[in-house]
């Protein structure tokens, strides 16, 4: 979790996206990130990441779903790289969804 949050802060800042860790702010958008890990067999797991993007009135404006199958051993060894790719692949879609609302 901490690795993902550090990567998220770093990559979002490169795209001029500020992260505020509380809902009690006057932000234009709220992003809720949900992780789901399902065991496929003894060696493989399925990782699902769902990004829910809300406007300032907490109305859902869109979602982004990502899903991949990994070897269990590989996921733990290269999580920093995987988390960067998850975030990088979502940034353009987040920008599209938030710019449609303007």
Image (cartoon, rainbow, N blue to C red):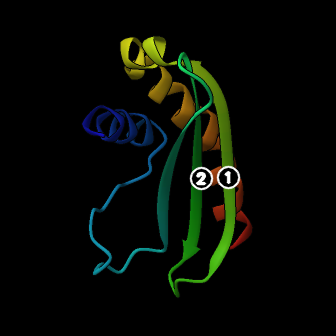
Of residues 99 and 88, which is closer to you in this image?
88
Dot 2 crowding, Cα within 10 Å, few <14, some 14–19, many 20+: some
On the rendered structure, is 75 left or right of 46? Answer: left
On the rendered structure, is 32 left or right of 63? Answer: left
Name the residue tied to disc 1.
64
Q: Which mark is residue 50?
A: 2
Q: In this orientation, does residue 62 appear?
A: yes
Q: x, y percentage for residue 18? A: 37, 54
Q: x, y percentage for residue 51? A: 57, 55
Up/down of 66 relative to 75, above or below: below
Residue at the image point whose x is 67% and y is 37% from the top: 67
- Position of the C terminus, as image quadrant, is bottom right
Of residues 12 and 65, which is closer to you in this image?
65
Residue at the image point whose x is 49% and y is 48% from the top: 35
Of mark 1 and mark 2, the one earlier in the sequence is 2
Q: Secondary structure at mark 1?
A: strand
Of residues 77 and 21, which is closer to you in this image?
77
Q: x, y percentage for residue 64? A: 67, 52
Kindly report which numbered mark, 1 or 2, lies closer to the viewer in this rendering.
Answer: 2
**Cα separation between marks 1 and 2:** 6 Å
Q: In this orientation, does residue 102 appear?
A: no
Up/down of 97 relative to 17, above or below: below
Q: Secondary structure at mark 2?
A: strand
Tags 1 and 2 in contact by the CB under 8 Å rule? yes
């Amino acid at each position: 979790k901490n690795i993902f949050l550090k990567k998220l802060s770093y990559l979002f800042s490169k795209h001029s996206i500020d992260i505020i860790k509380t809902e009690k702010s006057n932000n234009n958008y709220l992003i809720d990130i949900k992780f789901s890990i399902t065991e496929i067999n003894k060696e493989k797991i399925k990782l699902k990441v769902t990004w829910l993007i809300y406007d300032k009135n907490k109305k859902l404006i869109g979602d982004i779903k990502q899903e991949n199958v990994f070897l269990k051993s590989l996921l733990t060894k290269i999580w920093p790289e995987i988390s960067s790719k998850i975030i990088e692949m979502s940034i353009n879609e987040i920008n599209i969804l938030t710019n449609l609302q303007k």
